[in-house]
Image: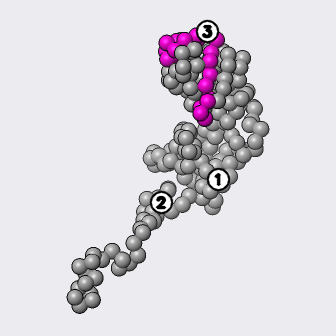
Amino acid sequence: MQLVVARIGRAHGIKGEVTVEVRTDEPELRLGPGAVLATDPASVGPLTVETGRVHSGKLLLRFAGVKDRTAAEALRNTLLIAEVDPAATPEDPEEFYDHQLMDLDVVLADGTEIGRITEITHLPSQDLFIVKRPDGSEVMIPFVEEIVTEIDLEEQRAVITPPPGLIDDSQAVVASSRDEGEGKSQAQDQEDDGA
């Protein structure tokens, strides 16, 4: 099975290094020196990682045959794809590969069906499940411990405890910094005081 493990960003320096947006929890395994990666677009690859290092919090890679900035810049926005055994699981039992989560049924703790995971979006701060509801609409569910309370791969389901308004807009709670009566203007206050 093939999984996207990174996207190539800008060229870095003049010796062929590129920044990469990591999309795997195991970059040292998937993007280490010697790793051979398929690409999208396929015409660019395969690419073999020659060196890797972290600079200012970003992973920089150099690929075999990419010797200068021009060649590195030509790789920009290329997706890096690793071949992964579909039966393999991450070492941490609280982590999952995207392919394990796709098509899971999403339910509330009481068993109420919400929908099915059709896509996983990776954002800098968290991942999002894109869930298709039975009526065809979609809802985004943050993949955080407070909301996604259980992933059961055997039962093929994700159990969620959503905050009010996440699933049903009519239950949304509008937070306000004003208490009742606090929103009066100074003129109203003066009138109330008899001024």
Q: At label 2, which amino acid type do we have?
A: Gly
Q: Is residue 104 magenta?
A: no
**Is disc 2 in contact with disc 3, using a CB cutoff of under 8 Å?**
no
Which mark lies nearer to you, 2 or 1? Answer: 1
Asked whether 15 or 122 is in front, the reply is 15
Residue at 60% x, 40% y is 103
Q: Was residue 58 drawn as part of the magenta stretch in this picture?
A: yes
Quadrant hosting residue 182 = bottom left
9 in relation to 179, above or below = above
Q: For the magenta stretch, what is the residue range?
A: 55-75
What residue appears at the point 50 percent right and 24 percent down from the top-left corner?
Answer: 10
Q: Is residue 48 visible?
A: yes
C-alpha distance separating marks 2 and 1 = 18 Å
Say which of marks 2 and 3 sits in front.
3
Graded by Cα atoms within 10 Å as few (under 14), some (14 to 19) or many (20 or more), the crowding at tag 2 reads few
Corner quadrant of residue 95: top right
Pick whichever of labels 2 and 3 is earlier in the sequence: 3
Disc 1 marks which amino acid?
Glu
The amino acid marked with disc number 3 is: Gly
Q: Residue at x 64, y 30 (%)?
A: 54
Q: Hey, which quadrant is residue 20 in on the image?
A: top right
Residue to which mark 3 is pinned? 65
Percent x, y of residue 31: 67, 25
- Tag on residue 165? 2
Circle on res. 145? 1
